[in-house]
Amino acid sequence: MVKELKSLKSMIQTDAIKHGDFVLKSGAKSSYYIDLRRVTLQSMGLHLIVDGIYSACTAHMEAVGGPCVGADPIVGGFLYKTSLSNVRGFLVRKEQKGHGIDDLIIGSVKPGDRCLIVEDVTTSGGSLLRACQIVQEFGCTVGEVISVVDRNAGAKELFESHDIKFSSLFNIDELL
């Protein structure tokens, strides 16, 4: 797995990290931006991410999901990898659509499921925590949260304060 993580790290550094002046979703300014979709939407990149998350996950889960849009390919890849173990998948919308099935959670998760929540990049963790809370309100247990990249801007501490296990494959200090 070490070799695979080195390959993934190199892909992220080469394809996903851009340097310049950026404004993040939180409004904070940053001298770099991580567009991990440039890796999750490559077959080898997604393969390496899913294998990394699969190896990092410490408990049995009935379902895997995460917030739209960053988690979408990761959830799909994870379901493919675990196709023989009957893991269910889901996504958490930022807001209700106002038409059709208006649920915030879409997919096959069921109340009572123990869930793994995945995300591509985590900064403060606020929007990811919101997704976890929506999953909990639905009646599931959040067993673990794994992000591909943690920007070290408070997510780990936020999840610790809510007694939710949080980890990442990389933190930003390892990538810059």
Image (cartoon, rainbow, N blue to C red):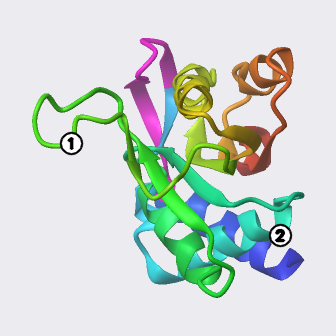
User: Which label's residue is closer to the chain start, 1 or 2?
Assistant: 2
Between residue 89 and residue 150, name the one nearer to us. 89
Which residue is the site of mark 2? 55
In the image, is residue 122 above or below residue 10?
above
Using the rendered image of the protein, determine whether residue 19 is visible from the camera's viewpoint.
yes
Using the rendered image of the protein, determine whether residue 35 is visible from the camera's viewpoint.
no
Quadrant where the N terminus is found in the figure: bottom right
Of tags 1 and 2, the one toward the viewer is: 1
Chief secondary structure of the magenta span?
strand
Amino acid on which disc 2 is placed: Ser
- Residue at 77% x, 24% y: name it: 159
The x, y position of residue 33, in whole percent, is 47, 38
Between residue 52 and residue 99, name the one nearer to us. 99
Q: Judging from the image, what secondary structure is the residue with disc 2 in?
A: helix
Q: Judging from the image, what secondary structure is the residue with disc 1 in?
A: loop
The x, y position of residue 11, in whole percent, is 58, 69
Characterize the local packing of mark 2: few (<14), some (14-19) or many (20 or more) Cα atoms within 10 angstroms.
few
- Residue at 53% x, 32% y: name it: 138
Q: Is residue 83 left or right of residue 96?
A: right
Marks 1 and 2, how far apart at CA:
34 Å
Between residue 4 and residue 87, name the one nearer to us. 87
Characterize the local packing of mark 1: few (<14), some (14-19) or many (20 or more) Cα atoms within 10 angstroms.
few
Q: Is residue 57 left or right of residue 149?
A: right
In the image, is residue 7 above or below residue 175?
below
In the image, is residue 98 above or below residue 170?
above
- Residue at 76% x, 79% y: name it: 4
Which residue is the site of mark 1? 101
Residue 74's label in the rendered image is none
Magenta range is 16-30
The x, y position of residue 164, in whole percent, is 81, 30
The x, y position of residue 49, in whole percent, is 64, 68
- Residue at 52% x, 46% y: name it: 66
